[in-house]
Image: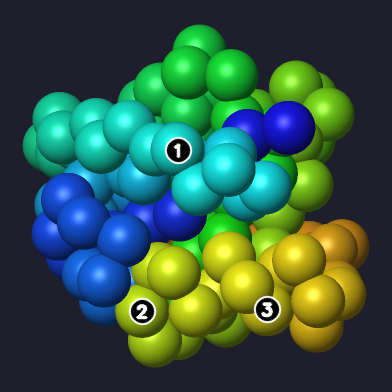
Amino acid sequence: MKIAVSSKGNKLTSQVDERFGRCAFFMIIEPESLEYQAIKNKDSEQGAGVTAAKTIVNAGAQALITGSCGPKAFMVLKEANADVILNGAGRVIDVIQQYKNGMFHKASAPNSEGGMGTKKEECIENIK
């Protein structure tokens, strides 16, 4: 299983970036071996969250640990059967250990409005 973590840097000791769609890197990690790949985020001007979600799904991630995630990105991840874990903070290596220790719960809804100021209800309605 591979886990994606939104990160401010490209090392396991980097800090988790609370912004999913606009993070600097995606760390794709195999939690048991701690083998990882750092993918630089493209940081799209529009649709950053959806682009980010597609990037980590295409990299084989089956779960995401991040600080916040908007409704459109959340929907893409859910459609790909990827777990979304919100409010991750600290170093990447530490959140991976917390994940392995069962300290996180899957999110049932996004925790950010996303859409560059679009109201959450509008984003969800546009996805349906």
Q: Amino acid at mark 2?
A: Arg
Q: Residue at image x 25%, y 37%?
A: 38
Please give the count of numbered marks on the rendered protein.
3
> Percent position (x, y) of residue 91?
36, 79
Q: Label 1, label 2: how many angstroms apart (C-alpha)?
A: 16 Å
> Percent position (x, y) of residue 68?
50, 70
Question: Which of the numbered marks, if any, corresponds to residue 84?
Answer: none
Is 1 above or below relative to 67? above
**Residues at marks 1 and 2 touching, judged by CB atoms closer than 8 Å:** no
- Residue 73, image quadrant: top right
Mark 2, other Cα within 10 Å: few <14 / some 14–19 / many ≥20: some
Q: Amino acid at mark 3?
A: Gln
Between marks 1 and 2 in the image, the one whose residue lies nearer the viewer: 1
Question: Which of the numbered marks, if any, corresponds to residue 98?
Answer: 3
Pick the front one: 22 or 125: 22
- Residue 46 visible here: no
On screen, residue 91 versus residue 86, left or right, reads left
Is 91 above or below relative to 83? below
Q: Circle 1 sits on which residue?
A: 35
- Residue 105, image quadrant: bottom right
Is 38 above or below relative to 100? above
> Percent position (x, y) of residue 29?
50, 42
Between marks 1 and 3 in the image, the one whose residue lies nearer the viewer: 1
Q: Amino acid at mark 1?
A: Glu
Instruction: Work out whether mark 2 precedes mark 3 in sequence or the reverse, and give the earlier one.
Output: 2
Pick the front one: 12 or 117: 12
On screen, residue 24 versus residue 96, left or right, reads left
**SS of the residue at dot 3?**
helix
**Farthest front residue?**
33
Q: Circle 2 sits on which residue?
A: 91
Mark 3, other Cα within 10 Å: few <14 / some 14–19 / many ≥20: few
